[in-house]
Image (tube, rainbow, N blue to C red):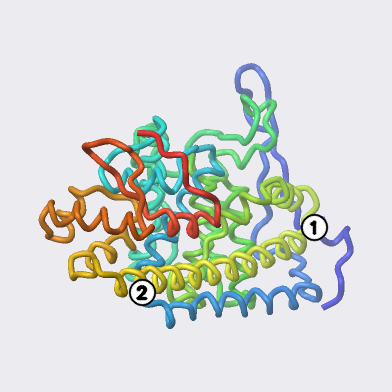
Amino acid sequence: MQNQSTSSKKDRIGKYVKSSIVSGESFNSYIPSKLPPEPPIDLSEIYPLLDKANTALGRLDGISLVLPDPALFLYMYVRKEAVLSSQIEGTQSSLSDLLLFENNGQSSNNLFDDVTEVSSYVAAMNYSIERLEKLPLSLRLICEAHEKLMNNSRGNNKNPGEFRTSQNWIGGSRPGNALFVPPPAEKLMNCLDNFEKFLHDDKVKMPILIRAAIAHVQFETIHPFLDGNGRIGRLLITLMLCNDGILKQPSLYLSLYFKANRQEYYNHLQNIRETGDFESWIKFFLTGVEKTSNGAVATAKNIINLFNQDSNLIETSDKCTPAILAIYKYLQKSPITNTGKIKEECKISLPTIIRNMENLEHLGIVEEVTKKERHKIFVYKKYLEILNDGEPINNFKY
């Protein structure tokens, strides 16, 4: 395929329409061109990156073959993604905050609203993946995921599960001074109908990673909900890859990459709207798939090494009992916990739990972080630090 000129790429640019006056001023909202992009995407410089991304993605999908408990890895990875994706939208809660909340309903650092918002995202992610088994990837499924996402105190007044019927905007205090104004409400369904057709159009011969990249940017441009568009748009990428079968498990999440390159990410989205240059965005996207996949594989290997190391430490000590092994296995799923939760999950007496948690402390596997006599909380810090990309876990406030 021949390289395309800048002028031909401009044929992909949507149009601005003057919208009705709001608060005494008129504004222009943007309606994207229909998909697939015309002229077609120039793949000449994209194929090498696509090959690298597919190879890395295959390695990530295959890691489940060597993981002792693939479900455990996904359990934690989904939570990590929920935290990062929500942080892009401004929440301050960490992975530790989320795990503490899930363990006993508490939140540290007065972040209850933030952590419940992240918890709702976990619910939306898990629900969507399960729903794919019975429902095709569609506007209906996207709305159902949105309803789960917004099921919290901050989202209840944002029409959960319903496409907007009023104008929204990005940046600024009103449409008149916004950085970007998505399509007006009366044009929304036309945009979404074309978007849904693109998800399933067999006539469009396009690698799934490129289709996912294009679908993501189109969804963010349409911005169909009053809130939650960024999180649903990022979740859409994983849903498309699982729906296509390129991923057997929902193990690719790009929020860490988008967060680390946030301004470049936003610049690419806007550049498509202004110049029609999908190719630069796709290169950025595929680079993110490769880096994220490789990072997730490295994380999985580090977790395996840690579990093997600490299991061996327990098994070769004079403190090794069936009870301590059961507690350690539970810590792999709940690295922030308390004695009451361990008793409930492991069916072990409280004195036995206390004795074995002290033994795990002496072995350097867990740390009690409250420094209180009662309501103690134990943390498997080395595990959390791996999940947290090597950053120390040391800011616990209760």
Residue 123 appears in the picture as rendered: no
Name the residue located 49 percent from the left edge and 38 percent from the top edge.
91
Q: Position of residue 293 (x, y in %)?
A: 58, 69
Q: Position of residue 129 (x, y in %)?
A: 38, 64
Q: Is residue 194 above or below residue 210?
A: above
Q: Amino acid at mark 2?
A: Asn
Q: Amino acid at mark 1?
A: Asp
Name the residue located 52 percent from the left edge and 57 percent from the top edge.
193
363 or 12: which is nearer to us?
363
Residue 323 as seen in the image, left or right of residue 43: left
Image marks 1 and 2: residues in contact by CB distance under 8 Å: no
Q: Position of residue 90 (x, y in %)?
A: 54, 37
Name the residue located 77 percent from the left edge and 56 percent from the top edge.
276
Can you identify the residue that label 2 sits on? Answer: 312
179 or 339: which is nearer to us?
339
Q: Is residue 106 above or below residue 283?
A: above
Residue 109 as seen in the image, left or right of residue 179: left
Tell me the quarter of the picture where residue 375 sits.
top left
Tell me the quarter of the picture where residue 11 sits.
bottom right
Residue farthest to the top? 24
Tell me the quarter of the picture where residue 35 sits.
bottom right
SS at mark 1? helix
Can you identify the residue that label 1 sits on? Answer: 11
Disc with the residue nearer the chain's start (1 vs 2):
1
Q: Is residue 300 above or below residue 254?
A: below
Residue 10 as seen in the image, left or right of residue 68: right
Of badges 1 and 2, the one in the foreground is 2
Q: Is residue 20 above or below residue 31?
A: above
SS at mark 2? helix
